[in-house]
Amino acid sequence: MSGHLDLIDLKIIESLGENGRIRLSELAEVVGLSIPSVSERLDKLQKNGIIKGFTMEVDERQLGFDIQAFVRVRIDSSRHYKSFMEHVLNEDEIMECFSVTGEGSHILKVMTHNTSSLEKFLSRIQSWPGVLSTNTSFVLSQLKKNKKISAGIVRNNLQDRQVLITFDEKKSRK
Amino acid sequence: MSGHLDLIDLKIIESLGENGRIRLSELAEVVGLSIPSVSERLDKLQKNGIIKGFTMEVDERQLGFDIQAFVRVRIDSSRHYKSFMEHVLNEDEIMECFSVTGEGSHILKVMTHNTSSLEKFLSRIQSWPGVLSTNTSFVLSQLKKNKKISAGIVRNNLQDRQVLITFDEKKSRK
DNA sequence: GCTGAAAATTATATGTT
DNA sequence: AACATATAATTTTCAGC
């Protein structure tokens, strides 16, 4: 498993959240370590699976995706679950899929070209075996998108579990 | 505005979606242009705002965020909108906020430490002026997260608007 | 807008504490 | 684990097309 995360790891994570293409040299400057040290830590964070990968944020509208929507799907659970999953993975217009509690068993985040393509998409979904109903909410605008993972908050989260060793704690151990 | 996007731009976008830290040298290989050309195109894509930035995907659980939830909020619209926005931007636990149609005026994607911190968060929300009700769905698991923006699909989207000029079209113009 | 080649910067590998 | 040094790779700059 992951071993321990210290504040430097968290700062690395925070910086990469703000700018995923930041250079190791800059990162080294930010956290106050040498480049090889930062490089090694970054490798470990990826090997541990704490950092899963790097992506990009795009302006979807400019790429012709004028419609975003949340679609709540109610599926006749167990029996059709496997085929549902396969369909979900195959549909490029489904950007995210969550299994959730509450009304409906799944929430799909959908991105598509126009109302016509959305209509086609919805009738496709409704034809999948086990799909009992759907309920669609259009996204009018996105008011917030939090990229940064604050080192401070993560630190608080992890202190409970003693996964994290802060610098001060380290110092005080002989 | 943005000028024109060709298939090479879309391939750059697709590659960066798969790996946001891909090197210019690799990118140049993928799209079949020289490194300076790719570098220039990347700059333009960022200046145009088509590429908004680069981030990282993390394993939230390993960082102590054990709870993710969608919270539908119904707010007494116009009058309290501004203060609502301010609150939303201030809360680090709100990762995303969408204005939507359907039941409730907004959907919040929330990430927090445990049920206790969620409970605190929900009572905080409910105390904001104008918040009439909330409805929370826990995320049990995320089944899909689409990082890649397929060049093929974007091409289809944009062809309608003639924003995109394909290589073949370019060739055929004198 | 693209290229090749020089210059500058950055990343990797190795050995040491 | 972190560092310094040396080496390798990458990115940037720029003249020329």
Image: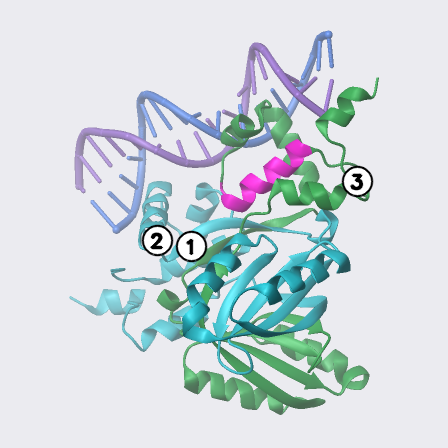
Chain colours: A green, B cyan, C blue, D purple
Real-space Cα distance between discs 2 and 3? 40 Å
Chain letter of the residue beneath label 3 in the structure image: A
Give yes or no for contact between labels 1 and 2 (Cβ–Cβ under 8 Å). yes
Amino acid identity at mark 2 = Leu
Local packing at callout 2 (Cα closer than 10 Å; few below 14, some 14-19, many 20+) is some
Amino acid identity at mark 1 = Ile
Label annotation for residue A38: none
Q: Is residue B58 above or below residue B72?
A: above
Tell me if I can see residue A67 in this picture: no
A54 in magenta: no
* Residue that numbered label 1 is attached to: B12
Q: Which residues are magenta?
A: A7-21
Q: Position of residue B88 (x, y in %)?
A: 52, 59
Q: Residue at 46% across / 66% down in the picture?
A: A142
* Residue that numbered label 2 is attached to: B45
Amino acid identity at mark 3 = Val
> Mark 2 against mark 3, which lies toward the viewer?
3
Q: Residue at 57% across / 72% down in the picture?
A: B73
* Residue that numbered label 3 is attached to: A163
> Which residue appears farthest toward the left when viewing the image?
B174
User: For this view, does C7 lie left or right of residue B58?
Assistant: left
Q: Nearer the viewer, residue D10 or A105?
A: A105
Q: Which secondary structure, mark 3?
A: loop
